[in-house]
Amino acid sequence: MTQKNQDRENQALVLAVLRSQQMFMRAMGPVFRDGGLTAPQWDALETLSHKGALSVNDLMQFTLSTSGSLDVVVRNLIQAGWVEKSVDEFDKRARVLHLTPAGHKKVADFLPAHNHALDQIFANLTEEEKRTSIATFNRFRKKLSQVKKD
């Protein structure tokens, strides 16, 4: 493959990823709004629901957030009563986030609508296409994490 063809292919891949993400968020936007959430709030709630209590830094790593944007998300989740922040018992400098009973209820209440929307979005994909996509995106994300940052 010539460099020019490789450049075109790389550019097409970038556009495919970005446009797919944008279309996905357009499809999910009303679901989040109807649930009284934003996508980053759901990401944090879902992560805390599955991983349990996490330090702010760990949550930032799992959600791929920046500290500035995560601070706003966490502040809003605390204000809504869905998350609490406490001092880490082992490292008094660190803060730990965990779901409140209201946070667990929010996750449980929102999950059916979320899953229904995902069923509709992915309805035309076969199980094999889903598995292949997951494997491809996981490999892509792993390779991206290995790219040296300037």
Image (cartoon, grey):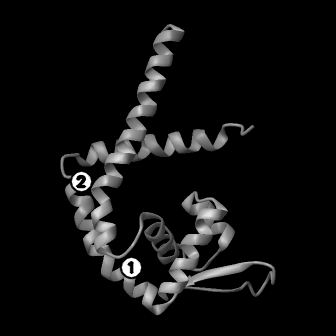
Q: Residue at x 46, y 32 (%)?
A: 14
Query: Which of the 4 image quarters holds residue 65?
Result: bottom right
Q: Residue at x 24, y 62 (%)?
A: 117
Asked if one can make out residue 72 in the rendered structure from this viewpoint, the answer is yes
Q: Which residue is mark 2?
A: 121
Q: Is residue 47 shown left or right of residue 96?
A: left
Asked if one can make out residue 82 in the rendered structure from this viewpoint, the answer is no
Q: Which residue is mark 1?
A: 107
- Whether residue 17 is situated above or below residue 114 in the rendered picture: above
Q: Residue at x 72, y 39 (%)?
A: 149
Assign the C terminus to one quadrant of the image: top right
Q: Position of residue 99 (x, y in %)?
A: 52, 84
**Circle 1 SS class:** helix
State how far apart marks 1 and 2 are (Cα).
20 Å
Q: Is residue 54 shown left or right of residue 111?
A: right
Q: Give the farthest residue toward the bottom.
A: 101
Q: Position of residue 35 (x, y in %)?
A: 32, 75
Q: Residue at x 49, y 16 (%)?
A: 6
- Whether residue 33 is situated above or below residue 5 in the rendered picture: below
The amino acid type, in three-letter code, at marker 1 is Val
The amino acid type, in three-letter code, at marker 2 is Ile
Q: Which sits earlier in the primary sequence, circle 1 or circle 2?
A: 1
- Are discs 1 and 2 less than 8 Å apart at CB? no
**Circle 2 SS class:** helix
